[in-house]
Image (cartoon, helix red, strand yellow):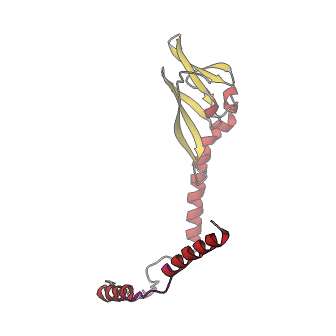
C-alpha cells in the first residue's frame, strides 16, 4: 500500500463519518414533545389566604402593676430563701476536712472488689495503681460524693452538684465492680 492509497482510504472513512453528522430533521421529536406538553396539566392547589390578625386590647383593670416595688421585694425574698436552702445543702461539705480520694475524679476510680470486715462492708478502690479501702460514710470524687451503700458489685454515692441554673442539688452516682483493671 502506498501513501496515497492510505490517504485516500482515510478520506473515504472520514467522508462516511461526516455524512452521519449531517443535518437531520427533528420534526417528529418536536411534535412528540408538544403533544406531551399539551397533555400534562400540573395539579397545583392554591395557597390559602392568610388569617386576619385581630389585635387584642390591653386592659389594665385587674392586672398587677409590673413596676410595683412590693412585687420586686417578694421576688427577691423568694430568691433569697432559695439561695439559703441551697447554701444549707453545700455548707456542711465546705466546713469539713477533705478526704484523700476527693481529689480524684470519679471516672478515674475503679472498684476492684469488696470484703466484710467485722460485719461492715468494705469496698476496694483502685486509683492510679494504688489500692484504697472505703466504707459507708467515706467521700469519693470531686462532687462531694458520700458513700451511702456498698454491695458486692457496686458503690452508691450521694453527690451534690450544681444544675444548669446554678442551684445545688443532690444526685445518686454509682461505681460498678470492674472485672479487669486496665
Above or below, comparing residue 91 to residue 121 in the picture: below
Residue 87: percent from left, percent from top: 62, 46
**Which residue is painted at 56% across and 28% down in the image?**
147
Task: Label the magenta part by its dominant secondary structure.
Answer: loop
Quarter of the figure that contains the C terminus: top right
Q: Is residue 156 left or right of residue 55?
A: right
Residue 49 in view here: no
Number of on-image labels: 0
Residue 50: percent from left, percent from top: 39, 87
Quarter of the figure that contains the N terminus: bottom right
Residue 117 in view here: yes
**Does the magenta run of residues contain 37?**
no
Judging depth in this view, the residue of 16 and 102 nearest the camera is: 16
Q: Residue furthest left?
A: 39
Displayed quadrant of residue 102: top right
Q: Residue furthest front?
A: 1
Residue 108: percent from left, percent from top: 64, 31
**Which residue is painted at 53% across and 10% down in the image?**
118
Judging depth in this view, the residue of 85 and 19 nearest the camera is: 19
Judging depth in this view, the residue of 14 and 32 nearest the camera is: 14
Judging depth in this view, the residue of 98 and 106 nearest the camera is: 106
**Does the magenta run of residues contain 22?**
yes
Q: Is residue 35 left or right of residue 83?
A: left
Displayed quadrant of residue 135: top right
Q: Which residues are magenta?
A: 20-27
Above or below, comparing residue 79 to residue 44 in the picture: above
**Which residue is painted at 60% across and 56% down in the image?**
80
Residue 22: percent from left, percent from top: 50, 84
Q: Is residue 8 left or right of residue 156?
A: right
Amino acid at each position: 500500500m502506498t501513501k496515497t492509497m492510505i490517504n485516500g482510504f482515510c478520506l473515504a472513512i472520514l467522508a462516511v463519518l461526516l455524512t452521519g453528522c449531517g443535518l437531520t430533521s427533528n420534526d417528529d421529536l418536536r411534535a412528540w414533545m408538544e403533544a406531551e406538553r399539551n397533555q400534562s396539566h400540573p395539579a397545583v392547589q392554591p395557597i390559602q389566604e392568610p388569617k386576619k390578625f385581630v389585635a387584642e386590647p390591653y386592659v389594665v383593670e385587674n392586672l398587677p402593676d409590673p413596676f410595683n416595688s412590693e412585687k420586686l421585694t417578694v421576688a427577691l425574698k423568694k430568691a433569697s430563701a432559695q439561695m439559703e436552702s441551697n447554701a444549707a445543702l453545700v455548707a456542711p461539705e465546705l466546713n469539713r476536712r477533705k478526704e484523700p480520694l476527693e481529689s480524684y475524679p470519679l471516672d478515674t476510680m475503679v472498684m476492684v472488689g469488696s470484703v466484710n470486715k467485722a460485719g461492715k462492708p468494705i469496698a476496694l478502690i483502685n486509683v492510679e495503681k494504688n489500692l484504697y479501702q472505703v466504707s459507708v460514710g467515706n467521700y469519693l470524687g470531686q462532687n462531694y460524693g458520700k458513700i451511702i451503700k456498698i454491695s458486692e458489685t457496686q458503690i452508691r454515692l450521694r453527690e451534690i452538684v450544681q444544675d444548669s441554673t446554678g442551684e445545688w442539688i443532690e444526685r445518686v452516682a454509682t461505681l460498678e465492680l470492674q472485672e479487669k483493671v486496665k
